[in-house]
Amino acid sequence: MSSPHILTAGSKVSTIMLLVLVALLPAIAAYYFFFGPAILISLTLASATALATEAMMLKLRSYPVKFFLADGSAILTGWLLALSIPPLAPWWLIVVGTAFAIIVAKHLYGGLGNNLFNPAMAGFAVLMISFPAIMTHWPTPLMLAQHPVGLAEALRYYFSGALQGVNLDAVTMATPLDTLKTQLSLQHTVGEVKHMPIYGSFGGKGGEVVAAMYLLGGLFLLQQRIITWHTPVSFLVTLALVAAVFNGINPTHYASPMFHLFTGGAMLGAFFIATDYVTAPTTPKGKLIFGTGVGILEYVIRVFGGYPDGVAFSILIMNAAVPLIDAYTQPRVFGHNT
Amino acid sequence: MRTLQKFHGGVHPPQHKAESNCLPILAAPLPKRVIVPLRQHLGTPAKVHVKIGDHVLKGQMIGIANGYISAAVHAPTSGTVSAIDLHAIPHPSGLPDLCIRIEADGEDRWIEHQAVDYKTADPDTVRAVLRDAGIVGLGGAAFPTYVKLNPGQQGKIRTLVLNGAECEPWITSDDVLMRERAAEIVEGIKIMAHLMQPEKVLIGIEDNKPEAIAAMQAVCRSVNLEQAANFEVVPVPTLYPGGGEKQLIKVLTGKEVPSGQRPLNIGVVCANVATAYTVHRAINHGEPVISRIVTVTGNVQRPQNFEVLIGTPLGEIIQLAGGAAADTSHYLIGGPMMGFDLTNLDAPLTKATNCIIAASPALFPPKPAAMPCIRCGQCAQACPADLQPQELFWFSQSKNFDKACAYNLFDCIECGCCDYVCPSHIPLVSYFRFAKSEIAMQNCEKAAAEQAREHFEFKKQREEREKQEKAARMAEKAAAAAAAKAAATANGEAEDPAIAAKKAAIQAAVERTKAKKAEAAAAASTNTTEPS
Ligand code: SF4
Ligand code: SF4
């Protein structure tokens, strides 16, 4: 055996993945509290699909199945996708998305550690492009809902595609981001729109709390040194700055920075997706560039693009630039250019 | 208080110092037989200076320093040379090396030896004494100290750094030495300072050794008072590899030793505290390096530091600590971060052996199977050389050695921090060693090919030149003949001699330019084929 002869106690890939899953729990709890139990079905389906497709691909590629299945990376992919798409949807939506993420975006790109694009976001993009209608049906926050969807009701919808007595439109609505966009196009001002019941203090009702919980989970990951500050800070600061500039120019047409930070997938993206080790830069400078790029693209796609949110696409676009970013941001090596 | 700098990265492995640093240094009994390797230092091995059957005295030189980067070796005790042959030595390669075996006569009789007054002696003489006393860096690399202590053309030495950091876990040999023999260490530092005349002397000790710091500080304080010296003991934060030469220099002086250069290039000389101790013994007592302090720890009954004669079989030294417990699986030489497996307990103690660790599966669990690199960047965050180990790993694994070099593989100090933190348990350092040796081999092959090519070119050139010379000679001859002919028929029907001579001259000139052109072409061809 050669040196070193010791390793950091307890440091394992599976431990890292587990901590990230744990960091997601507060947000999932808030999600459950504000939007009902459908998210649990979605997470369960995503986990099962992720494990099944991961096992299948490992077997096909002749890797030790048990050893790699235990690393937890597949479940994390499933969860991130489940948290990015509408929780009340036909069962095959999350299954197709997760399967694509694991089979194509992860394994066909070489498996753990080798994929260029974030698997969860690749899965999201495929669903967004293939099933745009379903992807815009988000559950109404429970405090606004006339027909709160319980677990049994949600299950029925998942597997039969129908709800009892009401149709889907009655229990779902466009997201706060989407609503803002539509209303602005109808010549309302941001101030007027924000008085609509789906808006909370600074983001969407309920959604802003979920976002705050992602922030909390992210701080936990920072404290555990699972992630570094570079990506989330550069991402969120850039998003806020760009939003502030537009908001400053025309506050009736452009929402405030706080609104942008606490709606949609900004917090989830900043702490959990843009920080994905495999598909983000490894150098500190590279992470800053990456986060800044995602922040700008996120705002542009959100505000000027055709999609309600831009996290997935902005991250995917920046993913493609990672090898280049890494190559050009190598830190100064000790004893060089002193 | 001196403001300290930081180096990037570093790790905090469990220290395990308390196991062995609570007991005082114990002198080992005289072994029956010692085995003294001729290569215990960096550079050329010492040249054998005895014959089988010779009786030698304790401290007698038995191997002479051979060349500039070399050091002498000495008989650790009196006895008879019984063999000069290959014997197991503690080395990462596990390969045997040439050793002199001495059967001790039990008298332990010293050869005549005397102190040198270093203050009045010529510095070169003092350095020669150090070389002949076999003084080498005892921190691990075993670089001949007399070479280090030569300011050479560099001129002014600004800082003399004494390394008492001892950052590797488990090892405490420098710690106990500083606690117990601070005064002698400082005597050695005085000699070094006298040779180098530095502006300041900094003694860096990690702050997990408060007793050693206190002992060194006490001695330095009185020396500073009495002799107007300026020796400063600087506690440095405990952070592996803070005792790495370049890291310690950075922490203490804020300066980085440029890549591929020596500390001397930035006016710094760095030596280990244990080396300073041996310098003192050599100059002030005339004693060469024939013993050292070694930590025996880990899975042994009574971990402790021992003062042991060089050449004592390591197995015997382990017995001094009560022997290894039953579940001992293997032994490590050095610390767990940079040490290596001991393959043979018959291997002797060398000058560079600072620690023997008995390892058990409980203390040193086997490494789990490696996973793919997940690009978490933890290795890069831990790397004290500011490298990107995950990239180096990628290039080493795919044998993309040019890229590995471009990403500064050769700045890797093999400290093991990256391995230590990698959640995928990838044996990164092994990959880097592999890549380095492959590249070194390729370079050797390239150099050999280059040499062969040069020989060939040279031969071709010589043949070319000979041809040209021959042509030139022919042309001259022809010209002379023509001139003679012209002269002979000066009054005849033939050419005007003046014209003939002119013709001949032109002919010769043409030949000359031809030759010159060929020469230039040959030169150009060698230039373009030169690797840039
Ligand atoms: S620590 Fe290991 S897994 Fe992480 S980037 Fe470095 S080599 Fe890859
Ligand atoms: S072994 Fe080399 S690459 Fe790894 S941390 Fe040490 S210097 Fe950096």
Image: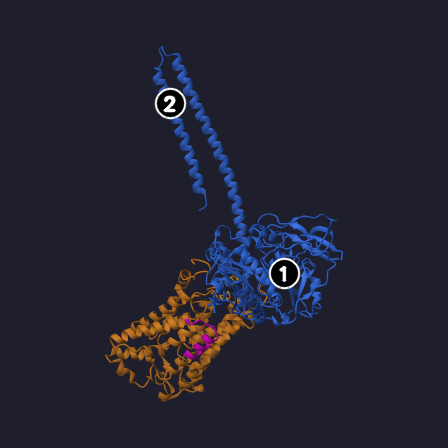
Chain colours: A orange, B blue
Can I make out residue A182 in this image? yes
Q: Nearer the viewer, mark 2 or mark 1?
A: 1
Q: Nearer the viewer, residue B33 or B493?
A: B33
Q: Nearer the viewer, residue B466 or B109?
A: B109
Classed neighbour count for the residue bearing mark 2: other residues with Cα under 10 Å, few (<14), some (14–19), many (≥20): some
Query: Does A227 appear in magenta?
Result: yes
Q: Chain of mark 1?
A: B
Residue B191, by quadrant, is bottom right
Residue A292, by quadrant, is bottom left
Amino acid under label 2?
Answer: Ala
Query: Does B524 appear in magenta?
Result: no
Rendered position, A87 above or below A121: below
Q: Residue furthest top?
A: B492
**Stretch of the chain drawn in magenta:** A215-229
Q: Chain of mark 2?
A: B
Amino acid under label 1?
Answer: Thr
The residue wearing badge 2 is B505
- Say yes or no: labels 2 and 1 on the same chain: yes
Rendered position, A338 above or below A70: above
Can I make out residue A61 in this image? no
Query: SS for tag 2?
Result: helix
Number of marks present in the image shown: 2
The residue wearing badge 1 is B353
- Magenta stretch: dominant SS? helix
Residue A94, by quadrant, is bottom left
Residue at 42 percent across and 19 percent down: it is: B480
* C-alpha span from label 2 to label 1: 77 Å
Query: Residue A95's x, y, as percent?
Result: 45, 75
Query: Residue B184's x, y, as percent?
Result: 61, 63
Q: Nearer the viewer, residue B368 or B531?
A: B531
Mark closer to the chain start, 2 or 1? 1
